[in-house]
Image (cartoon, helix red, strand yellow):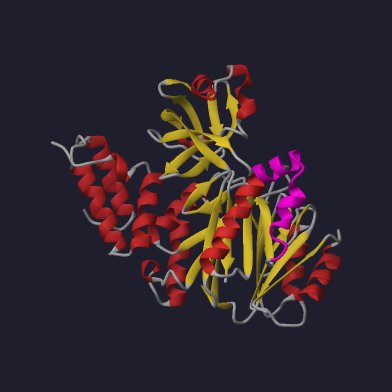
Amino acid sequence: MNYSVAYSTERKVMSAVNELSVKLGSQVPKMVLFFASPVYDAIEISQAMKEAFPNAKTVGCTTSGEIVSGAMLNQSLVAMAFGQNAVEDSCIEVIQDLHNPAATDKALTHFEEYYHTKMLNLDRSRFFGMVLIDGLSGAEEKVMERLSDKSDIVFIGGSAGDDLQFRQTFVYSDGKAYSKAALLILIKSGRPFDVIKTQSFCSTGKKLVATRVDEATRSVIEFNRQPARKAYASAVGISESEAANSFMSHPLGLMVGDEPYVRSPQQFNNDTLVFYCNVPLGMELELLASTHIVEDTENAIKNKVAELGNISAIINFNCILRTLELRQTGESEHYGRLFSDIPTIGFSTYGEQYIGHINQTATMLVFT
Amino acid sequence: MAGKIHMMIEKIVRERAKGDPIIESTTKTKLILKGFDPNKFSATSADDLQLIVKLKQVASDLGVSL
């Protein structure tokens, strides 16, 4: 098997890892990717996973809910084992100084040394990068922009979560646990791969231009030269006092053609609108309206299957806001079932990465 | 004067993509994420000095000499 998945809902680290190890079978994997609820002690789980798979590279992060073929889970451990033919080679870099672009540059230099190839010369049909990054750092844009500047291969991933506690997240690499850090994994794939980016919104055509911002705090002070609260409420067509209730159904989108790169409002700070990702000065956004997550995701997967012929595995970085909406509408099971027939793992993220940092989206890495 | 920003964007996309249509598309997306939507600048767009300075930095970050 090129890709095997397993999960455990055992609450003790050793029990969970043992169950996972048994389910993943006797084949020696080349790499094991795991997403673990923060109910598991960070240092223990990382060590236990490395001990269970000593001949594989073990990488992962904490979550705010997990996804496995056929189900959305909570307080569980999910893993995907990559067989010898699934991954030709991989190189892992841990970035601990997230706000310093030089730290990302250093990681990229190590990649170039490892593969003896300049980042810009990597074959984008063979190489992809996975990004697992602290979802409380506020540094995702900086890291993703640097990766996009310096390379043309796909970097995809998610921001590690902590079950909505907003205290501390971890990324895991080869037996160690890192907080306030990012994991970059540059993989030379043994199989063809592609990306699904799906979000359940359409544009309303109403434009909001950020005319006064505080990028350091991901805040927009004014849209269209009006206080952000007033401009947002006016665009939605509700009172300013009710505006915060519309964040989930009416985020904003940076439009790339018809495709929104979602920017989700988090809260009002007086009349300032604080986002889950950065909105630079002068950026023109459009007010979005929600559509149906399950239907849209089902269509996205079907379209990709039709395009590629088949899909052998999926890694799903699914925004926690999507997960919360699915819980509210009672559709979590339905969403999980979309992945019943395809070996899948994923987690509910504090942000999604693809070309840049985005919100309320599912970014999925798919393998044929 | 007009059209300089349009010309700079075209050069960034051309030099980065080197004829690869997929990289051309992702480079345009990267530019949009950085605040420069190629579709919003034409040969008649005014030469806004502030934007030109910013775009020069974007080109440098992308490894393109203008």
Q: Is residue A155 left or right of residue A172?
A: left
Please identify the quarter of the rendering in which residue A270 is found.
Answer: top right
Residue A330 pos. (x, y %): 77, 42
- Please state which of residues A276 and A260 is positioned toward the viewer in this rendering: A260
Q: Is residue A227 visible?
A: yes
Q: Main secondary structure of the magenta part?
A: helix
Q: Is residue A181 visible?
A: no
Q: Residue at horizontal 59%, vertical 17%?
A: A239
- Does the magenta-highlighted stretch encompass residue A322? yes
Q: Residue at x 63, y 64 (%)?
A: A314
* Image position, residue B21 (x, y; %): 34, 61
Q: Where A17 falls versus A37 (above or below)?
A: below
- Residue found at the very far left of the displayed protein: B1
Name which quarter of the figure residue A327 lies in: top right
Classify A287 as above or below A140: above
Judge whether A320 appears above or below A15 on screen. above
Q: For the image shown, how many numbered marks are present on the structure? A: 0
For the record, the magenta segment spans A319-341
Image quadrant for the N terminus of chain B? top left
Q: Residue at x 32, y 64 (%)?
A: B20
Decide which of A26, B44 is in the foreground and name it. B44
Q: In the displayed structure, does residue A315 sit left or right of residue B47? A: right
Q: Position of residue A280 (x, y in %)?
A: 42, 37
Q: What residue is at 65 percent from the left and 42 percent from the top?
A: A321
Instruction: Estimate the x, y position of residue A222 in percent, counting from the top left.
Output: 45, 24
Magenta stretch holds residue A268: no
